[in-house]
């Protein structure tokens, strides 16, 4: 079976990608004085609700120690109930920042070393792959430099809507035992497997669970009472239900073995406490570990860089991570020199939260931004739309299935949600949830032999299948 397309990762696109990179947050001017950001935030966030791109979201912004919280949409579609700073969301891969802070904390306590081979922290019966006699270290796992793939090849879920739920420690060990690295550790390749393995190793080292380690070392010291893997009844009541990018009900995700990659749930109020701690001084072990995780460890393509868990923008000072599960999207950024942080949590799995988080970070730092252009759709005769329906192959294993429901055209990529597309012309259509377009090729006899998917600067042909 080919590698499944799901992942608790910074980004999920129509086209599966090895590395999802956001644009730099840019070079900032003078720090903005704390003030009412409501008009600017409304202009950027409300269109996502109005255009049907998100069910609901909560935004938290810190400026010079002052915080503002903004809520939009609904907790449950059609309920009329607005979310707030206490609404619980899955934070997906933002969990990776917590995992790396745990590593930094143990390193500062001289309990482990960044240079420790992963092998030293696993049972003798488990063999971690090496390449050119170079072992995978704990730092390699925290910086996505291990050479391990994004996902293990034996992740074959019984329930694809909750893909990590039945992946066991025995399966993890079996994968490591049989896997061969394609190259030596030291080259960047984003890996949920790697950070999930790191969380497992750290918890095993301390003789506890990943959740308990987060609670003891980070959440409880910062009074983050709603940042957990397993929710109590009160938190479960405050959990916003998940929706996919088409605003269809989705499933919550459970990651018992790879928890360090994306298992945490939290609230904006809790995440603001975490962000505030990342901006604070202090010489206690936790604040020292937070600063250690922020330090640049390696360069990435296009001028980006990486710390322990954090991604660092081209300006060299803005740190961020995003996250997505089957029905949630999350953003966290901190800019220490400007005492600025931004949190966005949404119960819709849309890439638009990444774009929003980046723009809000600029706003919080006093950089003027323009709201993204809202493209206007035109009406196309449903009989014309019906001629586009069918299955189109980008590759033999990656298909685009085009369907028509009423007067709405949908496109579903292999292993992904069915998404609506909107007409810019009779043959050109655009997505609202991602930056992608589709052009149908219509022959003189009215047949439609292929389409082109335009994304990431590429024009990719897909032949219609018989």
Image (spheres, helix red, strand yellow):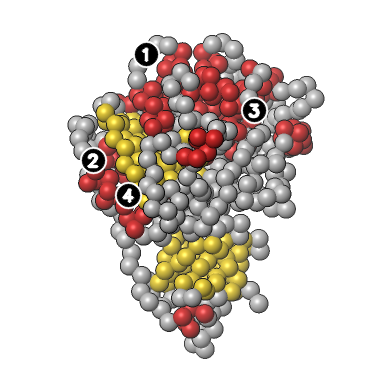
Judge depth for marks 4 and 1 and give the one in front: 4
Q: Which residue is mark 1?
A: 282
Q: Residue at x 56, y 10 (%)?
A: 110
Q: Looking at the picture, how far across and down is residue 437, in whole percent?
A: 44, 64
Q: Whole-percent x and y of residue 309?
A: 50, 30
Residue corresponding to mark 3:
200
Give the numbered dot on residue 37. Answer: 2
Q: Determine which quarter of the picture holds residue 83.
A: top left
Separation of marks 3 and 2 at Cα, in angstroms: 40 Å
Near-viewer residue (16 or 376):
376
Q: Residue at x 71, y 49 (%)?
A: 158
Label 2 vs 4, first from the N-terminus:
2
Image position of 335 (left or right of 198): left
Q: Residue at x 55, y 72 (%)?
A: 403
Q: Are marks 3 and 2 in contact (CB under 8 Å)?
A: no
The answer to whether the residue labelled 3 contacts the one labelled 1, judged by CB atoms less than 8 Å apart, is no
Determine whether 18 is above or below 411 in the image: above
Mark 3–mark 1 Cα distance, whole angstroms, equals 29 Å
Disc 4 secondary structure class: helix
User: Which quadrant does the C terminus fall into?
Assistant: bottom right
Counting residues from the start of the chain, the first of labels 3 and 1 encountered is: 3
Label whose residue precedes the other's in the sequence (2 or 1): 2
Q: Which residue is mark 4?
A: 45
CB atoms of marks 2 and 4 within 8 Å: no
Judge the density around disc 3: few (<14), some (14-19), many (≥20) Cα neighbours within 10 Å. Answer: many
């Amino acid at each position: 079976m080919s590698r499944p397309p799901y992942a608790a990762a910074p980004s999920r696109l129509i086209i599966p990608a090895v590395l999802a990179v956001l644009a730099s947050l840019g070079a900032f001017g003078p720090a903005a004085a704390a003030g009412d950001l409501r008009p600017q935030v409304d202009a950027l966030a409300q269109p996502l609700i109005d255009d049907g791109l998100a069910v609901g979201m909560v935004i938290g912004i810190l400026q010079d120690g002052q915080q503002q919280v903004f809520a939009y949409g609904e907790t449950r579609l059609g309920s009329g109930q607005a979310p707030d700073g206490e609404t619980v969301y899955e934070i997906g891969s933002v969990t990776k920042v917590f995992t790396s802070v745990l590593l930094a904390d143990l390193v500062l306590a001289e309990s482990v070393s960044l240079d420790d081979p992963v092998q030293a922290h696993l049972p003798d019966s488990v063999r971690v792959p090496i390449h050119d006699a170079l072992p995978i270290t704990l730092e390699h796992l925290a910086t996505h430099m291990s050479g391990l793939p994004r996902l293990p090849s034996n992740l074959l879920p019984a329930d694809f809507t909750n893909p990590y739920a039945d992946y066991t420690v025995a399966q993890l060990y079996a994968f490591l035992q049989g896997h061969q690295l394609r190259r030596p550790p030291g080259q960047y390749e984003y890996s949920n497997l790697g950070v999930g393995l790191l969380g497992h190793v750290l918890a095993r080292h301390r003789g506890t669970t990943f959740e308990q380690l987060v609670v003891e070392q980070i959440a409880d010291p910062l009074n983050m009472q709603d940042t957990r893997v397993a929710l109590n009844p009160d938190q479960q009541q405050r959990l916003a239900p998940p929706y996919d990018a088409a605003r269809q009900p989705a499933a919550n995700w459970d990651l018992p073995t790879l928890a360090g990659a994306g298992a945490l749930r939290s609230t904006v109020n809790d995440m603001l406490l975490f962000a505030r701690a990342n901006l604070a001084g202090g010489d206690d072990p936790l604040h020292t570990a937070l600063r250690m995780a922020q330090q640049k460890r390696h360069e990435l393509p296009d001028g980006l860089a990486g710390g322990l868990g954090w991604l660092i923008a081209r300006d060299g000072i803005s740190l961020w991570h995003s996250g997505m599960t089957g029905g949630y999207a999350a953003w966290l950024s901190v800019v220490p020199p400007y005492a600025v942080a931004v949190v966005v949590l949404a119960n819709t799995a849309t890439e638009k939260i990444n774009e929003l988080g980046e723009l809000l970070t600029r706003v919080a730092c006093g950089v003027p931004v323009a709201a993204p252009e809202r493209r206007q759709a035109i009406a196309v005769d449903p009989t014309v739309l019906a001629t586009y329906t069918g299955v189109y192959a980008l590759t033999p294993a990656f298909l685009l299935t085009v369907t028509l429901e009423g007067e709405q055209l949908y496109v579903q990529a292999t292993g992904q949600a069915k998404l609506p597309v909107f007409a810019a012309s009779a043959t050109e259509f655009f997505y609202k949830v991602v930056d992608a377009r589709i052009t149908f090729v219509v022959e003189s006899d009215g047949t439609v032999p292929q389409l082109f998917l335009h994304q990431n600067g590429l024009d990719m042909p897909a032949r219609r299948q018989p």
